[in-house]
C-alpha cells in the first residue's frame, strides 16, 4: 500500500522537520518541499509585480507538485508533500492525484500555540515570525475537519511522527 502524506501548517510549525522524519521511517519515500517548488521560478520582478503574479506562481507550484507526486507514486515510492496548503489547494491536489486501490492519502494540519510558533521561528536561520503567526490564525480559522489537526505544542518529533503514521483519522482517501 502506497502512502501520500500532505503536511501543512504555519511557517515554523515544524513541517519540514516532521516530513524528514516521516521519510526516514517509511521505506522508499520521496519528500517534496513546496518552498523549493515555489522558488524554482527565478524572477527579477519587483515585489508589487511578484504579488500580481503570486496566484499564477502558486498554481504552478501545485501543478508541479501533483505531477511529481503522481510520478513518484507510479514508481512505487511513498510521498511526503509539505507546504502551506489552503482548502482550494487541497481540493486541487486531491482532484489531480491518480487514485487507485493501492493508495492511502493522509492530510495533516500541524498547529501549536502562539508561543510555540514564536519560539520555533526565532530558532530558525530565516525567521518568518510575522507570517508564521498570521498563518497560525488562518489555519485555525479554516473549515477543515478538526480531526486533521495535530497540536504539536507538547509533542516531541517522535510522538508527532508516530501519530501521523499510525493514526487513521488523517486519511482523506483510501484505507477503507
Image (cartoon, rainbow, N blue to C red):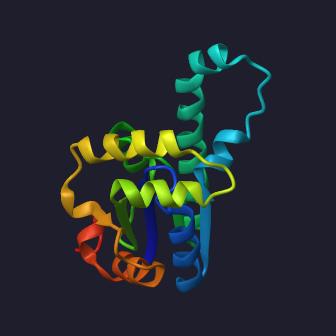
User: Please, is residue 58 above or below residue 164 in the view?
Assistant: above
**Quarter of the C terminus within the rendering:** bottom left
User: Please, is residue 128 above or below residue 104 in the view?
Assistant: above
Query: Which quadrant of the figure has residue 153?
Result: bottom left
- Residue 162: image location, x then y, percent: 39, 83
Horizontally, is 66 left or right of 151 in the view? Answer: right
Front residue of 71 and 41: 41
- Residue 3: image location, x then y, percent: 44, 72
- Residue 94: image location, x then y, percent: 38, 50
Horizontally, is 20 left or right of 141 in the view? Answer: right
Horizontally, is 166 left or right of 143 in the view? Answer: right
User: Please, is residue 82 above or below residue 45 in the view?
Assistant: below
User: Please, is residue 51 above or below residue 86 in the view?
Assistant: above
Front residue of 18 and 104: 18
Query: Which quadrant of the figure has residue 50?
Result: top right
In the image, what residue occupies the spot 37% across and 75% down?
Answer: 164
Q: Is residue 1 visible?
A: no
In the image, what residue occupies the spot 31% across and 66% down?
Answer: 150
In the image, what residue occupies the spot 73% across and 41% down?
Answer: 40
**Quarter of the N terminus within the rendering:** bottom left
Q: Is residue 141 visible?
A: yes
- Residue 91: image location, x then y, percent: 35, 43
Amino acid at each position: 500500500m502506497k502512502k501520500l502524506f500532505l503536511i501543512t501548517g504555519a511557517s515554523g510549525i515544524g513541517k519540514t522537520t516532521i516530513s524528514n522524519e516521516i521519510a526516514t521511517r517509511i521505506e522508499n519515500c520521496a519528500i517534496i518541499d513546496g518552498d523549493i517548488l515555489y522558488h524554482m521560478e527565478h524572477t527579477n520582478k519587483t515585489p508589487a509585480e511578484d504579488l500580481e503574479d503570486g496566484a499564477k506562481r502558486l498554481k504552478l507550484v501545485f501543478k508541479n507538485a501533483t505531477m511529481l507526486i503522481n510520478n513518484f507514486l507510479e514508481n512505487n515510492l511513498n510521498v511526503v508533500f509539505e507546504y502551506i496548503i489552503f482548502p482550494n489547494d487541497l481540493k486541487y491536489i486531491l482532484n489531480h492525484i491518480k487514485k487507485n486501490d493501492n493508495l492511502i492519502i493522509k492530510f495533516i494540519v500541524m498547529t501549536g500555540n502562539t508561543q510555540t510558533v514564536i519560539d520555533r521561528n526565532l530558532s530558525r536561520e530565516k525567521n518568518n515570525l510575522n507570517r508564521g503567526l498570521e498563518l497560525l490564525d488562518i489555519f485555525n480559522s479554516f473549515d477543515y475537519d478538526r480531526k486533521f489537526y495535530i497540536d504539536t505544542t507538547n509533542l516531541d518529533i517522535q510522538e508527532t511522527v508516530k501519530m501521523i503514521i499510525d493514526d487513521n483519522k488523517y486519511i482523506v482517501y483510501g484505507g477503507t
